[in-house]
Amino acid sequence: MLGKLSDFIYKKKTYGARTVITILGLKFKLYNLRKELCNESFSLNKNTIQMLYGYLYNSHEDDLFCLKTGSIIFIIHKDCLKLDYSFFQNYILPQSNSSSILELLKLDKDSVLYKEHITRVNDGEFLWKYVERYYYISHSFISQDKESGDIYINSSFVPEKDMVKSEYKIRHIPKISKRKYIKGITVGDYIKKKSRLERIVTVDKLLNYIFSAYRDNENPDKVSGKLLDCHLFNFIISEEGLFHFVDFDLECTESLDRAYCIFFMLYKYDIELYELMLKRYGLADRHDYYEKHFSIYRQPMVQNGKDIITAEHKKLQKKYFSDEGTRPQYKVKYKRVKL
């Protein structure tokens, strides 16, 4: 009886990277980052990002960390502390929601990915992201120019020797695009806590900017195909109040309808605002057409009778998205723990 009463007053249990303390029947979850770094899984949220940021502060110059999920990995060096904390957080968190299970580990110095990336730290690079797509792997990294001290975000795809050339309307930009880091907030984050009227005004200003800055010279009713991925989180409002489009990795090989921009931004985000903006600009609702013809997730897996997932691509998948790149000879045993 006394044992049960004692457990009700105070009880502590550890589940991998998580410690649960029960006080008077109330449960409190604590996360032990050192255990998470022992190759276990956890939920990605602001708390874990904050702990990672703090841990990096005390890490060594030759340490690299890998944050993994099914189709995305980040490789992180402590030089990312040069970034604003809010940018660091916002760069990683949108990749997944708070319930997603990821894995964080300190890269073994004998691993493939450690050897590949540690040499690039000397070139000013300090945060890398790889995203697995259907027939390519996109690659982004953040670096600092040694002379000017300016920070840049670079992106390209990881080249494959036998990659099938795409004939689709949608393509990935094959060369590295480079943009200067702009201090500000994404439009998606900016309008989250705004009133209904403020959301309408902000989105209307953004569309005015798009239809002017990216207008097709030959057809004023269309915009550049570079705006294929024009969702609200790919536009930044700078500290000066200016809009900047920041994701040029994907593009359409032809110009896009202005209504496509409204569809891509708002159709699955706020249907009432979507309909309001279509009416505001006198445009037709063509969401069925856009979903069918302009979604990279609906690209066929075979082209000209040839499997798009080539042998070279499978090697890259294995290198970046399996244990092969992070755990030499699978010598580390680990378990997944759902928090």
Image (tube, rainbow, N blue to C red):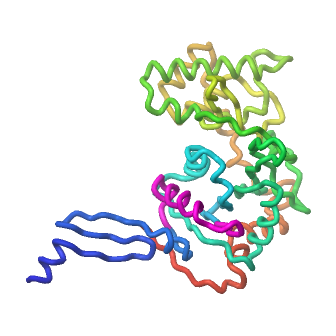
Q: Is residue 208 above or below residue 103?
A: above
Residue 41 screen position, x and y as percent = 51, 69
Callout count: 0
Q: Is residue 123 left or right of residue 241?
A: right
Q: Is residue 308 above or below residue 84?
A: below
239 or 290: nearer the viewer = 239
Magenta residue span: 42-65
Q: The N terminus lies in which quarter of the figure?
A: bottom left
Furthest-left residue in view?
Answer: 1
State the image quarter where residue 224 is shown.
top right
Left-right relation of 36 to 115? left
Which residue is located at x 84 percent, y 45 percent? 147
The residue closer to the viewer here, 6 or 222, is 6
Viewer-nearest residue: 1 or 95: 1
For the point 45% across and 27% down, which residue is it?
194
Q: Image quadrant of residue 205?
A: top right
In the image, what residue occupies the spot 71% across and 36% down?
Answer: 246
Q: In the rendered image, which quarter contains the C terminus?
A: bottom left
184 versus 79 height, above or below: above
User: x%, y% of residue 94?
Assistant: 57, 47
Residue 181 figure quarter: top right
Q: Is residue 116 left or right of residue 88?
A: right
Q: Position of residue 18 (x, y in %)?
A: 41, 70
x%, y% of residue 120?
A: 81, 61
Residue 227: say if magenta: no
- Depth check, front residue: 32 or 220: 32
Q: Is residue 63 above or below residue 199?
A: below
Seen as rendered, the residue at the extreme right is: 161
